[in-house]
Image (cartoon, rainbow, N blue to C red):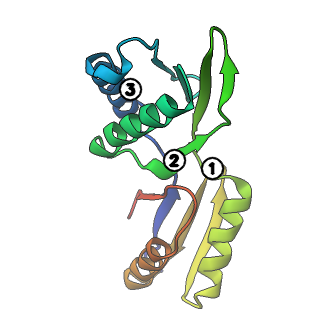
């Protein structure tokens, strides 16, 4: 019997790196002159996987988002893993925005990935396993071709390949 090779397609975020990026963004906001008179905060809820941004107005909110994104990029956290909520009014003439971290692949997105794998006509199988997709086959070259094909496809969410064996 020939050996079966496989890899998993996942959507993960390193929460420790997100926490470090949030702390760095807070330090930069404290140092910046344009934020001196404005109460601004960035809070990370690791259990809910959400970041809450609060600041004085929408103009400063855009600056806070830019600062946070730059810190996340430096820490190799994929920006595609962020889902931005609407900017809503908060207490004391301030605004709030909730950013949700997408962890795991949704069922509909997993179906799109498996359809893409099946349409490739390579001798591999794709199966949905909770919040990830496992691709398996006998030929390692076919698996690498699937990896290249999925990387070249522009998905609206972040993807990583793990457990390659």
Q: Are marks 3 and 2 in contact (CB under 8 Å)?
A: no
Residue 111 % position (x, y): 71, 66
Asked whether 155 or 104 is in front, the reply is 155
- Image quadrant in which you'd find residue 70: top left
Quote the CA–CA distance across marks 3 and 1. 26 Å
Asked whether 3 or 119 is in front, the reply is 119
Asked whether 25 or 30 is in front, the reply is 30
Is any part of residue 102 visible from this angle? Answer: no
* Residue located at (46% from left, 64% from top): 7
Label 3 or label 1, whichever lies nearer to me, is 3
Horizontal arrangement in the rendering, residue 155 relative to residue 138 (left or right):
right
Marker disc for residue 81? 2
Residue 157 % position (x, y): 55, 56
- Image quadrant in which you'd find residue 122: bottom right
Q: Is residue 129 above or below residue 111?
A: above
Quote the CA–CA distance across marks 2 and 1. 14 Å
Callout 3: few (<14), some (14-19), or many (20+) C-alpha neighbours within 10 Å?
many
Q: Secondary structure at mark 3?
A: helix
Q: Residue furthest top?
A: 92
Q: Which residue is mark 3?
A: 22
Callout 2: few (<14), some (14-19), or many (20+) C-alpha neighbours within 10 Å?
many
Task: Please tell me which of labels 2 and 1 falls first in the chain.
Answer: 2
* Residue located at (48% from left, 45% from top): 12
Q: Which residue is mark 1?
A: 131
Task: Please tell me which of labels 3 and 1 falls first in the chain.
Answer: 3
Q: Residue furthest right?
A: 108
Q: Which quadrant: the C terminus?
A: bottom left
- Image quadrant in which you'd find residue 116: bottom right
Q: Secondary structure at mark 2?
A: helix
Quote the CA–CA distance across marks 3 and 2. 15 Å
């Amino acid at each position: 019997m020939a050996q079966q090779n496989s890899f998993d397609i996942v959507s993960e975020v390193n929460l420790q790196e997100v926490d470090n990026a949030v702390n760095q963004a807070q330090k930069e906001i404290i140092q910046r002159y344009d934020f001196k008179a404005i109460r601004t905060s960035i809070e990370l809820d690791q259990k809910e996987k959400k970041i809450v941004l609060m600041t004085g107005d929408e103009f400063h909110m855009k600056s806070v988002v830019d600062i946070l994104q730059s810190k996340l990029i430096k820490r190799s956290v994929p920006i595609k893993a962020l889902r931005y909520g609407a900017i809503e009014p908060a207490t004391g003439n301030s605004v709030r925005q909730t950013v949700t971290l997408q962890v795991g692949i949704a069922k509909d997105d997993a179906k799109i990935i498996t359809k893409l794998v099946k349409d490739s006509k390579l001798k591999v199988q794709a199966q949905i396993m909770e919040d990830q997709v496992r691709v398996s086959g006998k030929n390692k070259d076919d698996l690498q071709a699937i990896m290249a094909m999925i990387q070249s496809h522009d998905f609206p969410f972040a993807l990583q390949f793990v457990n390659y064996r």
